[in-house]
Amino acid sequence: MSRESEFLTRWHEDKAAYMTWGRVISSAVQEHLATLIAPIACDYFLKTAIVPRIKDDHKLVEKAFHRKKNYTDPYADITDKVGIRFVVLLGSDTRLVETALRSIKGWTFSKDRDYEEEQKGNPLKFDYAALHFVVRPNEQEEHDGVLIPAGTPCEVQIKTLLQHAYSELTHDTIYKPQVEATHSMQRDAAKAMALLEATNDYFEKVACDVNSALSAVREMTTQLSSVYRDIVGFDPKPTIIEGWLLEAYEPLMSSDTVNEVKRFLALYPFIPDRIRAHVRQHNPIFNQPSILLVYLLVSRSLRKAISAWPLTAKEMEPLLNDLGESIN
């Protein structure tokens, strides 16, 4: 049996373990990331689906035995037999994914590439940029009936959407041997990367300005979420409706709004029961933390509350009925 055949035989025996390990990493990182980015959902924050990718047999054999790089132990030395990409919008977002990854216990992390560190070492060079980790379990694990041996490697790439676009464009030209990169290709690729870095800087500036403008609104959501959780007993699920409600009722709020909401709920102790009932009926409006604010404002001034309501009159009617009022 040739060395290539022996290599592939072993690979086919281990492939299920590698794929399962990739799924474990994908799930665990997203679970930890969710706590860092809440109330933003992971499927919004992450710009592509997180699907482990197993290296193709042909490409794996080619990399192991037919590249210029000589491996002492090809099977052990090739660490990207399975890989995962976490693609985000901004460079600063990549650090949140890295934090989530590093917060997981029982794994070993080796950083293969860190574009920020590479830029510090060579600030005039514009090259492929991303965070690359090799992640391994410290001990043997079992998931879905599949044993994952200790030390099984998975390559984890963390990159921005712009970096992802660049790597997709240049994958088979600038950094792979299938096509010989000309001087013009390399020059254009460097210019593209320089443009992408500049674009990311502008994106970061816009994001900073937006976050600054929304800081008060987000703080209100955070505070109302805490009250909602304590009083209603459910985790709130703010969506775009939360933004609509806070934008509509911001002129009616004061610096003491959260305490006013608490005092209102103390006077109307049946409101949490009504909210729970609406949530069980799958009405998303009552999953919003700011619904507590709307109840307060309806009790104060029905006319102003109805006038400012940003949704349809029919959607407000259940809330009004809870307080013995009606849109009419």
Image (spheres, rainbow, N blue to C red):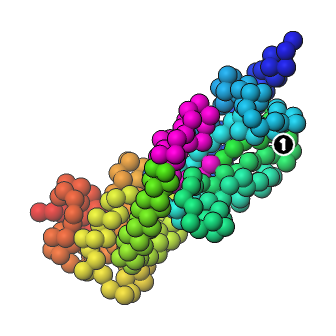
Query: Where is the C terminus found, in terms of image quarters?
Result: bottom left
Mark 1: which amino acid?
Gly
Instruction: Magenta stretch: give its range.
Output: 157-186
Name above or below for residue 77 compared with residue 163.
above
Q: Secondary structure at mark 1?
A: loop
Of residues 49 and 157, the one drawn nearer to the viewer in this rendering: 157
Residue at the spot x=38%, y=87% of the render?
Answer: 256
User: Label 1: which residue?
Assistant: 151
Residue at the spot x=37%, y=87% of the render?
Answer: 255
Q: Can residue 143 be seen by looking at this rendering?
A: no
Q: Can residue 87 be seen by looking at this rendering?
A: yes
Query: Where is the N terminus found, in terms of image quarters?
Result: top right
Left or right of 88 in this view: 55? right
Is residue 175 found inside the magenta-colored segment of the image?
A: yes
Residue 88: image x %, image y %?
50, 54
Q: Quadrant of residue 324?
A: bottom left
Residue 280: image x %, image y %?
42, 49
Of residues 255 and 29, the one drawn nearer to the viewer in this rendering: 29
